[in-house]
Image (spheres, helix red, strand yellow):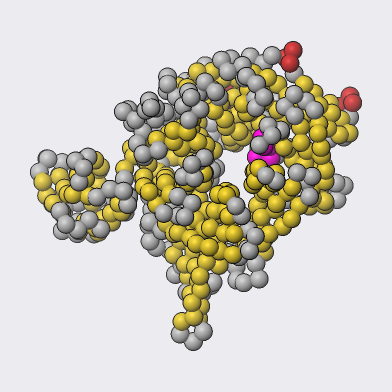
Amino acid sequence: MKKHLLLFVFAFAAMALHAQDEDLYSMVHQDMSGYGFGIESVTQQRNGDIIAVTHISQYPVFLGNIFFKMSPWFQSVTDSVFVADTMPPYYFFFRNPHGEGNIRTNLEYVEELDSTYVHICHFSDNSFQINHNEDVMVALREGVAYDEIDSYMIDCWGDIIMKYRIDRPDGNYDVYIARLDPDGTLKHQGLLYENVRTQIPKLRLLKESPVQYYQWSAVDSNIGPGKNLAIYVIDSLFSKNTIILDKILSEETIGDGIVAYEWLDIGNTDVIPIGGDDVLVASKYVSDTNFYSMTAEYGVAVAKYDLRTIQLKDYIVFNDYLGHSNEAQCLAIMKMSDGTVYFMYNEEGYPAESVIVVKMDTDLNVKWKRFCKTENIALWGGQRPFVFLYENELGEEEGIAWVGYGKNTNTNQYGVTYFLLNHDGTVGTNEGSIEVRPYAFYPNPVKEQLLMQFSPDVQPKQIELYDLQGRLVRTQSNSFESIDMSQLPVGTYTMRVTMEDGETYSDKVVKE
């Protein structure tokens, strides 16, 4: 099978854009400071190209949307379209499940008819030109309706499942859900939530038989601060059942009744089904002597729950950078068709340009772990990247890919980033703008002890440190958990790590 190259795209100031307003294009894309930017939808076309739909705003006004087409083979943005609009819709872009090409859909309010429609547009795989002869406008309801980012999905029947909201006079709103054929038939819709303040945007497929959808959110807990996790299971007729999962992973009584807890800090959370009634919940992890201690340890965790019994079955913790830090966050968790699970996160203590990717099975056995650091490109603004399973030309899953909103820390430019890791944790023959390591080291800069953490699928053989003159100043061949740098002079060193299989890696370490 062909190895794909890792692609890194940073596409704002230099790309050619088909803009409706050239002045606006120049203003937005030469300097993004002061502008809001977000990725709405990402999909991979059948020909392998990646499509990312973004929106741009300058508070309090929306400016429009940009559609990016990115080629994994040419490592570039090959086409893009800017649609200027002071009230842009949220677009959902996906492969046509019943034929060739791609489909873009969004809600549109037609003022002269005082009605909201679902607008369905068709694209070919090779062009961004919309075939307006095939456009479909589906009447949804009278009045104004609003959609939300991440409130669309394609189910196992190839239908579009979407949620939308209707504002109420008191400032709250009602949430509806609808099923449409991509060709334009409105099959079913119904009221999902009545008189609510906050919509839950996430919508996913839970089971194919019987068909069930699900979404999730945090709900108040009766035990200490933090939230439990509510899983909302929706059947094919849009009836809803709520399941509450306890955030507590473990507890222990110590001393005079003081309780030590391990728990999930629900909020920055992702949930995936893994077969039967089981789901995996990826979330921030907290370990504390009590809920009000200032000495808590933070990390991330993946917990396995049974939705039928509402029981925790197992969990695994990733707490790489020990200390009182609450900046760890889950970025995504995905399951392949063969049961392989990919988990991606980042954590304070590592550079902002880095993410960690873990490959495991549904029983939470880790296969490998990779530390991925880009060249001065940081995921920006707290926005989680869009993560998907990358497919080759034959439709075979080849690895995990992610598209995110990034900032170049050298130039302060903003843009779209795209990365791909193969199933074996490599990025092909050309690593482009990313460094992938089967280990992590921290802190860097370091004063005394440089801590090392290796992936379970590798075995280190030797670690060497060289000064700027190329002189070997330290060698370790039998203990790899840490490197004592307390006696070394202040300066920059090259660390060379050699594995048992002969693979070598070089990294810069700063002693302060």
Q: Residue furthest left?
A: 471
Question: Is residue 46 rendered to the left or right of residue 438?
Answer: right
Residue 170 shown in magenta: no
Image position of 275 with respect to 65: above or below: below
Q: Which of 162 and 474 lies nearest the eye of the viewer?
A: 162
Q: Can residue 321 be seen in this view?
A: yes
Residue 465 image position (x, y, % from top left): 16, 47
Q: Which of 300 and 335 lies nearest the eye of the viewer?
A: 335
Residue 62 image position (x, y, % from top left): 68, 32
Image position of 313 with respect to 208: above or below: below
Residue 92 image position (x, y, % from top left): 66, 31
Q: Which of 253 and 484 lies nearest the eye of the viewer?
A: 253
Residue 21 image position (x, y, % from top left): 64, 17
| Residue drawn 18% across the image and 49% down it | 461
Quadrant placement of the N terminus: top left
| Residue drawn 24% across the image and 58% down it | 482
Magenta span covers which residues? 150-155
| Residue drawn 55% across the image and 42% down it | 383
Q: Residue furthest bottom?
A: 256
Image quadrant in which you'd find residue 57 = top right
Q: Which of 113 and 270 lies nearest the eye of the viewer?
A: 270
Image position of 63 with respect to 146: above or below: above
